[in-house]
Image: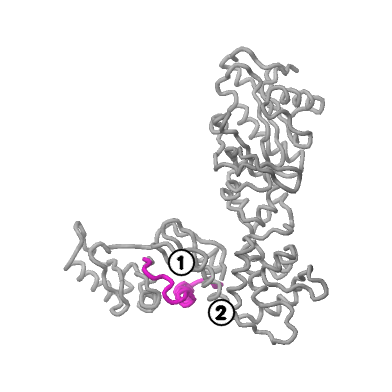
Amino acid sequence: MNWTPLNELLPAHALREITLRLAQPEEIAGARAALAREHYLGAPKPAECDVVQLAVRSEQVLAIVVWTRAARRLAARDAWVGWDARTRARRVPLLVQNNRFLVLSRVRQPNLASRVLGLAVDALPAAWARRTGVTPLLAETFVDPERYQGTCYKAAGWIEVGRTAGCGRHGDDYYVRHDQPKRLWLHPLAADAPARLREPLEPLPGEKPRAFGASPVPVKTATSLADALYAVADPRRRQGLQFPLHAMLAAAVLAIASGARTVSDLFRFVQELTPAQRRALRFRPSPKNRDLVPPPGEGCWRKVLQRLDPAELTRAIVHWQLGQTRLPPLLALDGKTLHRGLATLVTLCDAETGAPLVQVAQGGQGHEKNLAHALLAALPPGALDGAIVGGDALYADPALVRPLVQEQGAIALVQLKDNQPKAAAQAETLLAQAAPPFFRLRPKSATAASTSGTTGFSPSPRNSSASSTPPNCSKSSATA
């Protein structure tokens, strides 16, 4: 096997003659020696050479590709996937990192690097599965912007998602700042890889079954949630209450957001938190040992959840959600029935991005209007002051529009169809009297805007001609 770098340009047909294979045990030493000699980072440690691939043509090694375990935390990567800390802790084993890539040539070979990377990525899932027993879903790599632009990665279909923070791992437990941020590139190894990695409810082969000490939100957020849920009345008797209700409810909300489905899942979620994390959720330490913060048992969870008032919990969670972020000026109210009538969701979301802000749910179908009433009732007075809230024809109901305008201070923008014939006729008449430029009256339907709840539907000045719920209104798992 020839490890000497090329000094001449390959013929055009040579790219079709390249084969990519795994390095044999006796070839690993030669590959590491070539990396130590030619790569600016040198050779990786033996423990960081989980999979070594060689691009070969006629016994000439053209390139070396080395793969190892992915980084534990990368802010840009985690944001691109859509991970919280708990999901990341369980699914990092499904990622791999390209920590070395070397083309053995003194002469620039057009398309050689991207060709080798394409072959390497195609062969990686099977090679990694044979080595570790886990089929990876995403590959990552870093490019030093002071040396390279990452053109070959871009040509091979990789996606640049941001830059690192300028820190490197030192040992297994902590990081050291080197102030040399790298460009971060990702390559999905399956068509639906990002969606599968971010979905917490569907277990994936190879993920860690448990995530000790991983919370889906920062400590301050968990504490503020527990404090907000203190307003929920405790249905239990006051005597002998070891576990505060607001602590249990905050833990339950975080557990459900992390994919918990059963009471056993709730119990395991709290059990896997550290004592400091349980203390941040307002659980009490043990009287005998202040360093221990015991979690509730499954029996305690069942007794509390069976006696809880869902409407009161919904109001408390909604109040907390609205306090976490500033509401955008343009909102949409939309409902959806899940999977053959399994449940109905009504969401108040950002009309521009589709991000859900407040959501309520109920089992079965046909509850959209009732849930819309429940969502508005859960909002604190004036929560939507000055915001424009759009909705389809289902929400063209004075019983919904009046509280939206009079109690919440919003500007309601809803469709009018034949389900509201009098209001539609009134809107047609008003539009005919002061129609916007180039406006054509529709013979059987119209759209109007309401800024006052006293007359049901009264149009806004001139430019309030039509609106419907934006099509990008997205849904998420029910939180209340």
Label of residue 315 in the image: none
Q: Where residue 372 appears, x then y in whole percent?
A: 45, 73
Q: Is residue 380 magenta?
A: yes
Any magenta on residue 175? no
**Location of residue 141 in the rendering, given as x and y in whole percent from the top left corner:** 63, 37
Q: Look at the picture and state if 444 lies above or below 199.
A: below
Give the residue type that dot 2 points to: Glu
**In the rendered view, does 360 fall on the left or right side of 306?**
left
Q: Answer few, some or many: residues within 10 Å of disc 1's Cα (few below 14, many 20 plus, some between 14 and 19).
A: many
Q: Residue at x 48, y 68 (%)?
A: 346
Quadrant holding the N terminus: top right
The boundaries of the magenta stretch are 361-388
Give the labeled residue for mark 2: 312
Foreground: 3 or 321? 321
Q: Quadrant of residue 133?
A: top right
Residues 205 and 291: in front is 291
Instruction: Give whichever of 71, 373 is nearer the camera.
Output: 71
Q: Position of residue 97 (x, y in %)?
A: 67, 39
Secondary structure beneath dot 2 equals helix
Q: Quadrant of the C terminus?
A: bottom right
